[in-house]
Image (tube, helix red, strand yellow):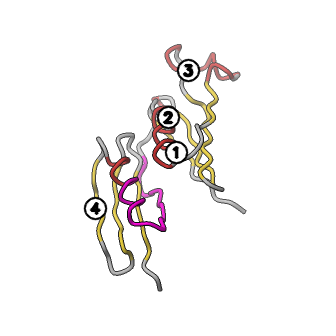
Amino acid sequence: MNLTPYLLFDGHCEEAFTLYARVLGAPAAEFSRFAQTPMAGQVEPDWAQKIIHADLKIGNQILMGSDAPPAHYKPPQGISICINFDSEAEAERVYKALSESGKIVMALQETFWAKRYGQIVDRFGIPWMFNVPKAM
């Protein structure tokens, strides 16, 4: 069994997944657009090139997402994407890149359970946690 996070965006899925691929060192995401599906006639013309499905392979994991038409979009609430790092330097690099133009919820810092831990909401409204665990 695998759990796969599926992120919904307000029209910025392609931009977000392009950033995530670059920052996380992943190959380019695969995108399907509304115009390529039977849904093409059910969205406004300016949504034809928006993303109906995206796959981003990060290591041996997949992050999925899509643009939700305005009547169906709700900002994420009560959930975060948590990334565990082996390296403090890598956590700091990714934290800095994803927090740019976003909101820092908790600065990246040492905690009783982590060498580094922090939280942000990126510029696309996606909540992230960054964790470099201490040896137990």
> Which one is closest to the eye, mark 4 or mark 1?
4
Which residue reaches farthest top? 45
- The kind of residue on which mark 3 rests is Gln
Q: Are marks 2 and 1 in contact (CB under 8 Å)?
A: yes
Q: Are marks 4 and 1 in contact (CB under 8 Å)?
A: no
Residue 110 appears at what percent x and percent y?
A: 30, 73
Q: Quadrant of the N terminus?
A: bottom right
For label 1, the residue is 7
- In the image, what residue type sits under mark 1? Leu
Q: Quadrant of residue 88?
A: bottom left
Instruction: Decide: few, some or many residues near mark 2? Use Cα within 10 Å; few <14, some 14-19, many ≥20.
Output: many
> Could you say which quadrant of the image residue 130 lies in?
bottom left
Judging by the rendered image, the residue that carries numbered circle 4 is: 106
Residue 49, numbered circle: 3
Q: Residues within 10 Å of mark 3 (few under 14, many from 20)?
A: some
Q: SS at mark 2? A: helix
- Between 98 and 4, the one nearer to me in the picture: 98
Q: Which residue is mark 2?
A: 13
Q: Mark 4 or mark 1, which has the lower sequence index?
A: 1
* Residue nearest the observer in this picture, 64 or 94: 94
User: Could you give the CA–CA distance between mark 2 and mark 4, rounded to whole angstroms?
Assistant: 25 Å
Q: Is residue 117 left or right of residue 31?
A: left
The dot on residue 16 is none
Circles 3 and 2: CB atoms closer than 8 Å:
no
Q: Which residue is found at the position 67% from the left and 21% from the top?
A: 36
Q: Residue 76 in the image: state x and y as whole percent.
A: 43, 48
**Lower sequence index among marks 3 and 1:** 1
41 to the left or right of 67: right
Seen in the picture, residue 16 relative to 5 is either above or below; the reply is: above
